[in-house]
Image (tube, rainbow, N blue to C red):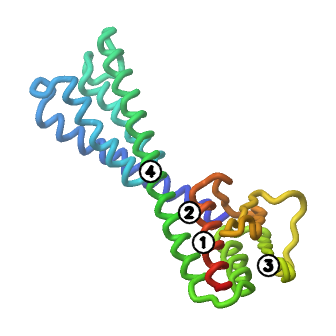
Amino acid sequence: MKSRLSFSVEMFSQCALAVLTVAAATIVLLLIGRDTLGEAVIALLYLVPIGWSASRWGQGPGMSAALAAALTFDFFFIPPFHTFTVGSLEGWLVLAIFLAVAIVVVGRIQSGLSRARASEREAIFMYELSTALAGLRTQDAVVHALARHLQQMFLATLVQVSIQPGSQSSPIRVKAPPDGAASGKPDRVLPILAAPGLVGEIHLWRGDGWLPPEDSRLLQNFSTQAALALERAQL
């Protein structure tokens, strides 16, 4: 409850700062003068604080900045001035186009930021997994480290790693946590493919954590890292 309230206060503060950024831009535009710039240039200049707010604080503040910019643009720069009334069809078109472009700009910035954060998270996960598997001398140690690390990484209810070391060896099956239990089918099943073919599988049950899509590059890289670690341990 406390964290949710803190998040709400932080979001409100960020939206307020985004609106203040638009207000500061409006003061600058008024000082320059509407006759000097013209409606088209003013609309383009308003996209600067909108884009900056979206990149700095995220989608919510970006949309707040877009709405504030549309209102101030209408109030100060679209006739009749100093009212929220739009006196002509041209004014309505200008305002509508501006708001649509602002929303698209915020959406594209948010999409780019989301992809960047996902790539950063994947790089961190891959580094942590590679570090955990490096230097392990036995396949049993690899399986235990793999299950434990994946469970901690994704906050999964259960991770089960099963491998068949060889035709003459008994299978190795490890769960993390050791006393964990999950009902139903696993949310993700990752095959571990080595030179001989399929040598094992990784089963993940989601729990309260986040799991990437089954065909994602991240999970494919995890499967590859597991296969390489098992081959190193076998050699």
Marks 4 and 1, how far apart in space?
A: 34 Å
Crowd class of label 3 (few under 14; some 14 to 19; many from 20; radius 10 Å) = few
Q: Earlier in the sequence, mark 3 or mark 2?
A: 2
Residue at numbered disc 3:
166
In this rendering, which labeled residue sits more in front, label 3 or label 2?
3
Relative to 5, is 19 on the left or the right? left
- 49 or 177, nearer to the observer: 177
Q: Earlier in the sequence, mark 2 or mark 1?
A: 2
Q: Amino acid at mark 3?
A: Gly
Q: Earlier in the sequence, mark 3 or mark 4?
A: 4
Residue at numbered disc 4:
58
Look at the image and tell me whether residue 94 can be seen.
yes
Q: Position of residue 213 (x, y in %)?
A: 65, 52
Q: Amino acid at mark 2?
A: Ser
In this rendering, which labeled residue sits more in front, label 1 or label 3?
3
Crowd class of label 2 (few under 14; some 14 to 19; many from 20; radius 10 Å) = few
* Residue 104 - label: none
Q: Secondary structure at mark 2?
A: helix
- 232 or 5, nearer to the observer: 232
Residue at numbered disc 2:
6
Q: Amino acid at mark 1?
A: Gln
Q: Secondary structure at mark 1?
A: helix
Look at the image and tell me whether residue 173 can be seen.
no
Image quarter for residue 1?
Answer: bottom right
Residue at numbered disc 1:
225
